[in-house]
Image (spheres, rainbow, N blue to C red):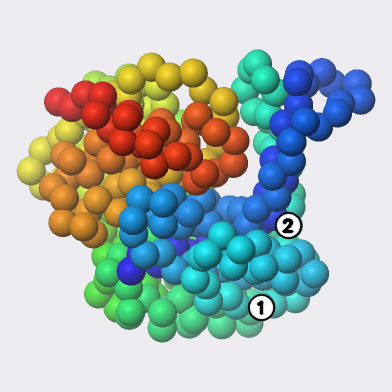
Amino acid sequence: MILCVTPNPAIDRTLLVSRLQPGEVHRVTRAIVAAGGKGLNVARAVQLLGGRPLVMGLLGGHSGRLLADLAAADGLAARWTFSDGETRTSVIVVPEVGEATVINEPGPVLTPASWLRFVDDVAAQAQQANVVCLCGSLPRGLPADASGDLVQAVAVTGRLLWVDTSGQWLRHAISVCPAGLKVNSMEAGELLGTVIDGPEAAIVAANQLHKRGIRMVALTLGRQGAVLVDEAGYYVAWPPRVRSVSNVGSGDCFLAGLLTALTAGQPPAEALRWAVAAGTANTLAPGGGRFAWSDFQRILARVELR
Protein backbone atom coordinates (compact mmCIF):
# COMPACT_ATOMS: atom_id res chain seq x y z
CA MET A 1 0.00 0.00 0.00
CA ILE A 2 1.21 3.51 -0.89
CA LEU A 3 0.11 6.09 1.67
CA CYS A 4 -0.39 9.47 -0.02
CA VAL A 5 -0.46 12.31 2.52
CA THR A 6 -1.73 15.79 1.57
CA PRO A 7 -1.71 18.17 4.56
CA ASN A 8 -3.46 20.97 2.61
CA PRO A 9 -5.84 19.36 0.08
CA ALA A 10 -8.18 21.31 -2.19
CA ILE A 11 -11.22 20.95 -4.36
CA ASP A 12 -9.83 21.30 -7.88
CA ARG A 13 -12.13 23.00 -10.37
CA THR A 14 -10.63 22.54 -13.85
CA LEU A 15 -12.32 24.77 -16.43
CA LEU A 16 -11.74 24.20 -20.15
CA VAL A 17 -12.13 27.31 -22.33
CA SER A 18 -11.48 28.04 -25.98
CA ARG A 19 -9.04 30.82 -25.05
CA LEU A 20 -8.04 32.84 -21.98
CA GLN A 21 -8.07 36.61 -22.22
CA PRO A 22 -7.86 38.77 -19.05
CA GLY A 23 -10.75 41.22 -18.68
CA GLU A 24 -13.16 39.24 -20.86
CA VAL A 25 -16.14 36.97 -20.13
CA HIS A 26 -15.39 33.31 -20.87
CA ARG A 27 -17.70 30.39 -21.59
CA VAL A 28 -16.58 27.10 -20.12
CA THR A 29 -16.76 24.18 -22.55
CA ARG A 30 -16.17 21.55 -19.87
CA ALA A 31 -15.70 21.54 -16.10
CA ILE A 32 -14.00 18.88 -13.96
CA VAL A 33 -14.49 18.98 -10.19
CA ALA A 34 -12.20 16.66 -8.24
CA ALA A 35 -10.56 15.99 -4.91
CA GLY A 36 -7.28 17.81 -5.40
CA GLY A 37 -3.88 18.46 -3.91
CA LYS A 38 -0.63 16.78 -4.83
CA GLY A 39 -1.19 13.60 -2.83
CA LEU A 40 -4.66 13.11 -4.33
CA ASN A 41 -3.19 13.36 -7.84
CA VAL A 42 -0.52 10.84 -6.85
CA ALA A 43 -3.16 8.46 -5.50
CA ARG A 44 -5.32 8.59 -8.65
CA ALA A 45 -2.30 7.84 -10.81
CA VAL A 46 -1.11 5.03 -8.50
CA GLN A 47 -4.55 3.45 -8.77
CA LEU A 48 -4.55 3.81 -12.55
CA LEU A 49 -1.12 2.13 -12.73
CA GLY A 50 -2.29 -0.86 -10.71
CA GLY A 51 -1.07 0.14 -7.25
CA ARG A 52 -3.07 0.38 -4.01
CA PRO A 53 -3.16 3.93 -2.64
CA LEU A 54 -4.56 5.26 0.64
CA VAL A 55 -5.07 9.01 0.97
CA MET A 56 -4.85 11.12 4.11
CA GLY A 57 -5.34 14.84 4.64
CA LEU A 58 -6.81 17.57 6.80
CA LEU A 59 -10.39 18.49 5.87
CA GLY A 60 -12.82 21.07 7.20
CA GLY A 61 -16.31 22.45 6.65
CA HIS A 62 -18.74 21.85 3.77
CA SER A 63 -15.89 21.88 1.25
CA GLY A 64 -14.08 19.20 3.23
CA ARG A 65 -17.11 16.92 3.16
CA LEU A 66 -17.46 17.50 -0.58
CA LEU A 67 -13.79 16.65 -1.12
CA ALA A 68 -14.22 13.39 0.83
CA ASP A 69 -17.22 12.52 -1.36
CA LEU A 70 -15.27 13.30 -4.55
CA ALA A 71 -12.37 11.10 -3.45
CA ALA A 72 -14.79 8.26 -2.70
CA ALA A 73 -16.37 8.71 -6.14
CA ASP A 74 -12.90 8.18 -7.64
CA GLY A 75 -12.68 4.90 -5.71
CA LEU A 76 -9.91 6.16 -3.42
CA ALA A 77 -9.62 4.67 0.06
CA ALA A 78 -9.12 7.45 2.62
CA ARG A 79 -8.49 8.20 6.29
CA TRP A 80 -9.30 11.88 6.86
CA THR A 81 -8.54 14.09 9.85
CA PHE A 82 -11.26 16.74 10.32
CA SER A 83 -10.50 20.15 11.80
CA ASP A 84 -11.91 23.67 11.99
CA GLY A 85 -11.95 25.96 8.97
CA GLU A 86 -12.99 25.40 5.37
CA THR A 87 -11.05 23.27 2.90
CA ARG A 88 -9.67 25.42 0.10
CA THR A 89 -10.53 25.47 -3.62
CA SER A 90 -8.13 25.68 -6.56
CA VAL A 91 -9.23 26.91 -9.99
CA ILE A 92 -7.37 25.63 -13.05
CA VAL A 93 -8.18 27.30 -16.38
CA VAL A 94 -7.10 25.31 -19.43
CA PRO A 95 -7.30 27.06 -22.85
CA GLU A 96 -7.20 25.14 -26.13
CA VAL A 97 -3.88 26.81 -26.94
CA GLY A 98 -1.33 27.88 -24.33
CA GLU A 99 -0.45 26.95 -20.77
CA ALA A 100 -2.95 26.30 -17.98
CA THR A 101 -3.47 29.00 -15.34
CA VAL A 102 -3.69 27.82 -11.71
CA ILE A 103 -5.21 29.92 -8.90
CA ASN A 104 -4.68 28.38 -5.45
CA GLU A 105 -6.46 29.52 -2.32
CA PRO A 106 -4.16 29.45 0.74
CA GLY A 107 -6.38 27.15 2.81
CA PRO A 108 -7.58 27.36 6.41
CA VAL A 109 -5.58 28.50 9.41
CA LEU A 110 -4.86 25.41 11.48
CA THR A 111 -4.51 25.18 15.25
CA PRO A 112 -1.46 23.39 16.73
CA ALA A 113 -3.78 20.84 18.38
CA SER A 114 -5.34 19.86 15.02
CA TRP A 115 -1.88 19.54 13.46
CA LEU A 116 -0.61 17.25 16.23
CA ARG A 117 -3.72 15.09 15.87
CA PHE A 118 -3.07 14.82 12.13
CA VAL A 119 0.60 13.91 12.68
CA ASP A 120 -0.48 11.16 15.09
CA ASP A 121 -3.07 9.85 12.60
CA VAL A 122 -0.50 9.71 9.79
CA ALA A 123 2.13 7.99 11.96
CA ALA A 124 -0.40 5.35 13.02
CA GLN A 125 -1.51 4.65 9.46
CA ALA A 126 2.07 4.65 8.13
CA GLN A 127 2.76 1.44 10.00
CA GLN A 128 0.42 -0.36 7.59
CA ALA A 129 2.05 1.06 4.43
CA ASN A 130 4.87 -0.13 2.18
CA VAL A 131 5.84 3.45 1.35
CA VAL A 132 4.63 6.90 2.42
CA CYS A 133 4.74 10.08 0.36
CA LEU A 134 4.22 13.51 1.91
CA CYS A 135 3.07 15.92 -0.78
CA GLY A 136 2.38 19.60 -1.13
CA SER A 137 2.14 22.61 1.16
CA LEU A 138 1.16 22.90 4.81
CA PRO A 139 -1.91 24.73 6.14
CA ARG A 140 -1.51 28.26 7.46
CA GLY A 141 -0.88 28.91 11.12
CA LEU A 142 1.91 26.37 11.54
CA PRO A 143 5.60 27.00 12.23
CA ALA A 144 7.97 26.51 9.32
CA ASP A 145 9.47 23.38 10.88
CA ALA A 146 6.08 21.59 11.11
CA SER A 147 6.94 19.61 7.98
CA GLY A 148 10.02 18.27 9.76
CA ASP A 149 7.82 17.08 12.61
CA LEU A 150 5.63 15.16 10.17
CA VAL A 151 8.63 13.63 8.40
CA GLN A 152 10.16 12.59 11.72
CA ALA A 153 6.90 11.02 12.92
CA VAL A 154 6.75 8.83 9.81
CA ALA A 155 10.48 8.11 9.76
CA VAL A 156 10.43 6.53 13.22
CA THR A 157 7.94 3.93 11.96
CA GLY A 158 10.69 2.55 9.72
CA ARG A 159 8.62 2.87 6.54
CA LEU A 160 10.13 4.22 3.33
CA LEU A 161 9.31 7.90 3.17
CA TRP A 162 9.26 10.19 0.12
CA VAL A 163 8.84 13.96 0.25
CA ASP A 164 7.51 16.24 -2.51
CA THR A 165 7.14 19.81 -1.29
CA SER A 166 8.84 23.17 -1.78
CA GLY A 167 10.17 26.33 -0.15
CA GLN A 168 10.54 26.48 3.61
CA TRP A 169 8.63 23.21 4.05
CA LEU A 170 11.15 21.46 1.80
CA ARG A 171 14.13 22.82 3.76
CA HIS A 172 12.79 21.57 7.05
CA ALA A 173 11.55 18.26 5.63
CA ILE A 174 14.92 17.22 4.23
CA SER A 175 16.70 18.23 7.45
CA VAL A 176 15.55 14.88 8.89
CA CYS A 177 16.70 12.95 5.78
CA PRO A 178 13.71 11.19 4.23
CA ALA A 179 14.48 8.05 2.21
CA GLY A 180 13.41 9.67 -1.05
CA LEU A 181 13.02 13.17 -2.45
CA LYS A 182 11.19 14.33 -5.57
CA VAL A 183 11.76 17.93 -6.67
CA ASN A 184 11.61 19.87 -9.91
CA SER A 185 14.43 22.01 -11.28
CA MET A 186 13.07 25.28 -9.82
CA GLU A 187 12.58 23.80 -6.34
CA ALA A 188 16.02 22.21 -6.31
CA GLY A 189 17.64 25.37 -7.69
CA GLU A 190 16.06 27.50 -4.99
CA LEU A 191 17.13 25.03 -2.32
CA LEU A 192 20.74 24.86 -3.51
CA GLY A 193 21.13 28.45 -4.72
CA THR A 194 21.88 27.51 -8.32
CA VAL A 195 20.34 27.38 -11.79
CA ILE A 196 19.42 23.94 -13.12
CA ASP A 197 19.00 24.23 -16.87
CA GLY A 198 19.45 20.68 -18.12
CA PRO A 199 20.29 17.06 -17.31
CA GLU A 200 23.96 17.63 -16.50
CA ALA A 201 23.20 20.37 -13.98
CA ALA A 202 20.38 18.22 -12.60
CA ILE A 203 22.77 15.31 -12.01
CA VAL A 204 25.11 17.58 -10.05
CA ALA A 205 22.24 18.99 -7.99
CA ALA A 206 20.71 15.59 -7.28
CA ASN A 207 24.11 14.29 -6.18
CA GLN A 208 24.47 17.18 -3.75
CA LEU A 209 21.10 16.33 -2.20
CA HIS A 210 21.97 12.63 -2.12
CA LYS A 211 25.14 13.43 -0.18
CA ARG A 212 23.01 15.06 2.52
CA GLY A 213 21.82 11.59 3.45
CA ILE A 214 18.81 11.15 1.16
CA ARG A 215 18.92 7.66 -0.29
CA MET A 216 17.21 8.40 -3.62
CA VAL A 217 16.69 11.78 -5.31
CA ALA A 218 14.45 12.30 -8.35
CA LEU A 219 14.73 15.66 -10.11
CA THR A 220 12.30 16.51 -12.92
CA LEU A 221 13.04 18.79 -15.89
CA GLY A 222 9.73 18.96 -17.74
CA ARG A 223 10.17 18.22 -21.46
CA GLN A 224 13.88 17.54 -20.83
CA GLY A 225 13.01 14.47 -18.77
CA ALA A 226 14.30 13.62 -15.31
CA VAL A 227 17.27 12.26 -13.39
CA LEU A 228 17.42 9.79 -10.53
CA VAL A 229 20.40 9.46 -8.19
CA ASP A 230 20.95 6.64 -5.67
CA GLU A 231 23.84 4.69 -4.14
CA ALA A 232 24.57 2.98 -7.46
CA GLY A 233 24.92 6.17 -9.49
CA TYR A 234 22.60 8.18 -11.72
CA TYR A 235 19.99 7.55 -14.41
CA VAL A 236 18.59 10.01 -16.97
CA ALA A 237 15.32 9.47 -18.86
CA TRP A 238 13.78 11.47 -21.72
CA PRO A 239 10.12 11.40 -22.81
CA PRO A 240 8.98 11.42 -26.43
CA ARG A 241 7.56 14.68 -27.76
CA VAL A 242 3.79 14.89 -27.31
CA ARG A 243 1.14 17.55 -27.81
CA SER A 244 0.39 18.75 -24.29
CA VAL A 245 -3.08 19.74 -23.09
CA SER A 246 -2.12 20.63 -19.49
CA ASN A 247 0.93 19.88 -17.36
CA VAL A 248 -0.95 20.40 -14.07
CA GLY A 249 -0.38 17.36 -11.85
CA SER A 250 2.31 15.85 -14.08
CA GLY A 251 4.94 16.02 -11.35
CA ASP A 252 2.54 14.16 -9.07
CA CYS A 253 1.97 11.50 -11.71
CA PHE A 254 5.75 11.23 -12.12
CA LEU A 255 6.01 10.41 -8.41
CA ALA A 256 3.13 7.93 -8.71
CA GLY A 257 4.88 6.09 -11.54
CA LEU A 258 8.15 5.99 -9.63
CA LEU A 259 6.64 4.68 -6.37
CA THR A 260 4.30 2.19 -8.06
CA ALA A 261 7.19 0.67 -9.98
CA LEU A 262 9.52 0.56 -6.97
CA THR A 263 6.91 -1.08 -4.72
CA ALA A 264 6.26 -3.62 -7.49
CA GLY A 265 9.93 -4.61 -7.36
CA GLN A 266 11.16 -2.80 -10.47
CA PRO A 267 14.81 -1.62 -10.43
CA PRO A 268 15.42 2.14 -10.15
CA ALA A 269 16.17 2.59 -13.86
CA GLU A 270 12.86 1.03 -14.90
CA ALA A 271 11.04 2.93 -12.15
CA LEU A 272 12.37 6.18 -13.63
CA ARG A 273 11.01 5.16 -17.04
CA TRP A 274 7.60 4.52 -15.46
CA ALA A 275 7.77 7.90 -13.76
CA VAL A 276 8.60 9.83 -16.93
CA ALA A 277 5.94 7.94 -18.89
CA ALA A 278 3.25 8.64 -16.28
CA GLY A 279 4.16 12.32 -16.01
CA THR A 280 4.13 12.70 -19.79
CA ALA A 281 0.86 10.79 -20.24
CA ASN A 282 -0.75 13.15 -17.74
CA THR A 283 -0.09 16.13 -20.03
CA LEU A 284 -2.43 14.66 -22.64
CA ALA A 285 -5.60 15.21 -20.58
CA PRO A 286 -6.93 17.91 -18.22
CA GLY A 287 -7.11 17.06 -14.53
CA GLY A 288 -4.36 15.52 -12.40
CA GLY A 289 -4.02 11.73 -12.60
CA ARG A 290 -6.66 11.17 -15.28
CA PHE A 291 -4.57 9.88 -18.18
CA ALA A 292 -5.34 6.75 -20.16
CA TRP A 293 -3.55 3.47 -19.47
CA SER A 294 -3.06 3.03 -23.21
CA ASP A 295 -1.28 6.41 -23.44
CA PHE A 296 0.99 5.44 -20.55
CA GLN A 297 1.95 2.15 -22.25
CA ARG A 298 2.53 3.82 -25.61
CA ILE A 299 4.76 6.51 -24.09
CA LEU A 300 6.62 4.05 -21.83
CA ALA A 301 7.76 2.14 -24.92
CA ARG A 302 9.34 5.35 -26.24
CA VAL A 303 11.05 6.68 -23.11
CA GLU A 304 14.84 6.82 -23.56
CA LEU A 305 17.19 5.95 -20.72
CA ARG A 306 20.87 6.55 -20.01
Report the quarter where the C terminus lies. Answer: top left
Of 116 and 279, which appears nearest the observer? 279
Crowding at dot 1, Cα within 10 Å, few <14 / some 14-19 / many 20+, comes out as some
Answer above or below: position of 28 versus 132.
above
Residue positioned 18% across, 41% down in the render: 270
The answer to whether the residues at label 2 and label 1 have Cβ atoms under 8 Å apart is no
Specify which label sits upstream in the sequence, 2 or 1: 1
Q: Distance between the residues labelled 2 and 1?
A: 13 Å
Label 1 is placed on what type of residue?
Answer: Phe
Residue labelled with disc 2: 88
Classify residue 150 as left or right of residue 215: right
Crowding at dot 2, Cα within 10 Å, few <14 / some 14-19 / many 20+, comes out as many
Report the quarter where the N terminus lies. Answer: bottom left
Secondary structure category for the residue under label 2:
strand
Q: Is residue 169 visible?
A: no
Q: Position of residue 64 (x, y in %)?
A: 71, 68
Of 239 and 114, which appears nearest the observer? 239
Q: Quadrant for residue 63, please give it.
A: bottom right
Residue labelled with disc 1: 82
Classify residue 111 as left or right of residue 274: right
Secondary structure category for the residue under label 1:
strand
Q: Where is residue 295 in the image (x, y as percent from the top left)?
A: 39, 33
Residue positioned 23% across, 59% down in the render: 263
Answer above or below: position of 52 versus 271.
below
Q: Quadrant for residue 219, please give it.
A: top left
Answer above or below: position of 14 versus 147.
above
Answer above or below: position of 48 versus 65.
above
Classify residue 196 as left or right of residue 30: left
Residue positioned 70% across, 23% down in the render: 95
